[in-house]
Amino acid sequence: MVQLTDLQKKLLNDFQRNFPLTPQPYAEIATQLGVTEADVLQALQELNARQFISRIGAIIPPNQIGVSTLAAMAVPENELERVATQINQFNEVNHNYERENTLNLWFVIIANDTTHLENIIQSIEVKTGYDVLRFPLEKEFFIDLSFHLDLTNA
């Protein structure tokens, strides 16, 4: 059974939305929860180390700031880990995941402008030795990825 502190449970449930947009957001969260900023930071570090969270940051709709594209590659199974690691070294790569298909490595690239986007794609192709297929956004769908977690027994 997963054991979480009350603070960790509150952080997981209460701050998926309405994260404080202040110069010191963790201090603001601490004030709301009646703990110290150090307590909040430590709890978040523990959640990250235990892979309950992977990042804290804004979700910005595609192409509102800069440009982006969904990209895919066909990579031989024995090369997949190496290529994924190389792609993840680019700050412009938002996320990267394996799929069961000929096109088995998918990721999103976000760049300042179309020239920067194309330069990143070309750099990925040179570094990995594989072509990158582009799947630019044609129609936007919004999926709410916030979840209320029942953590009463956690």
Image (cartoon, grey):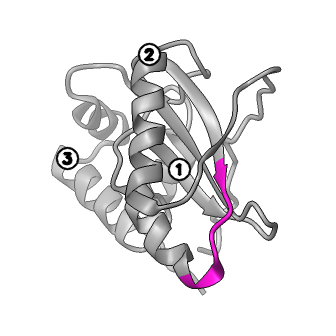
Camera sees residue 7:
no
Looking at the rendered image, the quarter that the N terminus falls into is: bottom right
Residue 83 percent across, percent down from the top left: 47, 67
> Would you say residue 30 sits in the magenta stretch?
no
Residue drawn at 80 percent across, 21 percent down? 138
Q: How far across and down, in percent of the image, does residue 147 sit?
A: 69, 47
Q: Is residue 29 or residue 67 the one in the foreground?
A: 67
Q: SS at mark 3?
A: loop
Residue 137 falls in which quadrant of the image? Answer: top right
From the viewer's perspective, tell me whether residue 28 is left or right of residue 139: left
Mark 1 highlights which residue? 95
Q: Are marks 1 and 2 in contact (CB under 8 Å)?
A: no
Q: Nearer the viewer, mark 2 or mark 3?
A: 2
Q: Decide: marks 2, 3 in contact (CB < 8 A)?
A: no
Residue range of the region highlighted in magenta in the rendering: 72-78
Q: Which mark is residue 36?
A: 3
Residue under label 2:
113
